Amino acid sequence: MSITEIGRATEQETAELVRLRRDFHRHPELGYQEVRTSGIVATRMRELGYEVRDGVAKTGVIASRGAGGRTLYVRADMDALPIVEENDVDYRSTQDGVMHACGHDAHTAIAMMVAERFAKADLAGRISFGFQPAEEGGQGADRMAEQGGLDGVDAALGLHVWSSLPVGKIGVTTGPAMASVDEFVIEVRGFGGHAAVPHLADDPIVKAAQLVTDLQTIVSRRVSPLDAAVVTVTRFDGGSAFNVIPDSVTLWGTIRTFNERVREDTHRLLQEITGERGTVSIRRVTRVLVNDARMCEIVREAAASVVGPENVIDSERTMGGEDFATVLATVPGCFFFVGSALPQGTFPHHHPRFDVDERALPLGLDVMTRAAHLYLERGFRDGAGAA
């Protein structure tokens, strides 16, 4: 099979995509706990004749085929979220408090079907499928890379079903496409006492409330309006009774940027504004996801052949983060969005009622297959990436 012989997804392929996605949706597993999911993946890949390494980064699977030429890495994340599902559907989660609320069930199903297509193809190179654990803050991509998942890889592709795009639209953004993600924790210190005599205490709740307001000035007054940044406080914990002033209050939140310089500046400003009011700790979760222009050209060409050039969106950026950024910091690649909004309206990613319009699944399959073939057959147009 060559690129010119790839047709649209058949009814049989579409039915299998839906079956796989719904099965994974019914049985979601949190990061590094994807035992059932990875077991199904590994078994299917072996049946298709792939060389399989399982247990990578605890529950990850690497399935490879072909030899010589270029090597392409196709990533699919498998983990779910600690969310109680509220959808009234027959494929609703059967796991209490765990839900596929971001579309990773769809990503795994699509990658499995792409692999099935390539099992029947005459490869002009080598393809490696990375079924990854713990994308949701667990840095699974880093662990996969550390354990050899990217060894010998020349380029990479990944996709994400996307609730802000209607079915039939494909988002391909050159350069920074998804933000860096950092988690911060601030412990605001004070001196507790009786609520009836606040003048005898050093109230950390008042300090923390003022700090939440002060932190808003980082983006509004300290970062250039030409640079994108987000500083959001998401949790405020302190106190144990209505008549007791506590000794301390803890704030949690996140920082998002599209630029490493802005990222470092924002970290510094967070420390500076907090000052002596408390102590700050920052955990770097993911870096900025930067798409390679040459790989984006390949994906745009593939997408245009599936949905038409008028339906390929060039400016779909988000302050959401993705640990596929680790892969793209190592090899050139493209992470693209597949429109999956429900016609009646879609709840956002990570919402208890998030769902996917399953008409997006065969489009993701077709675009990924074509893009992978284009890269393996010809590499980049300027000759780079050739074997």
Image (cartoon, rainbow, N blue to C red):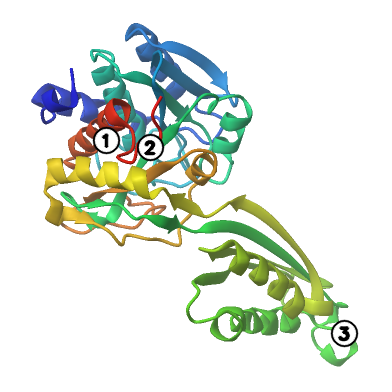
Residue visible at 48% across and 51% down in the picture: 289
Q: Position of residue 58 (x, y in %)?
A: 59, 24
- Quadrant in which the C terminus is drawn: top left
Residue 333 is labelled as none
Between 72 and 89, the one nearer to me in the picture = 72
Asked whether the viewer can see residue 378, the reply is: yes
Residue 320 to residue 32: above or below:
below
Whether tag 2 and tag 1 are in contact, CB under 8 A, the answer is: yes
SS at circle 2: strand
Q: Which mark is residue 201?
A: 3
Estimate the spatial distance between the alpha carbons at disc 2 and disc 3, rounded to whole Å: 57 Å
Q: Which one is closest to the eye, mark 3 or mark 1? A: 1
Which of the two labelled residues, at mark 3 and mark 1, occupies the earlier sequence position? 3
Q: What residue type is labelled 1?
A: Ala
Q: Which of marks 2 and 3 is in front?
A: 2
**Residue matched to label 1:** 371
Residue 354: % across, % down: 33, 51
Classify mark 2: residues with Cα within 10 Å, few (<14), some (14-19) or many (20+): many
> How many marks overall?
3
> In the displayed structure, does residue 377 sit left or right of residue 30?
left
Residue type, mark 3 in image: Ala
Residue 234 in view? no
Q: Residue sitting at 59 percent across and 37 percent down?
A: 142
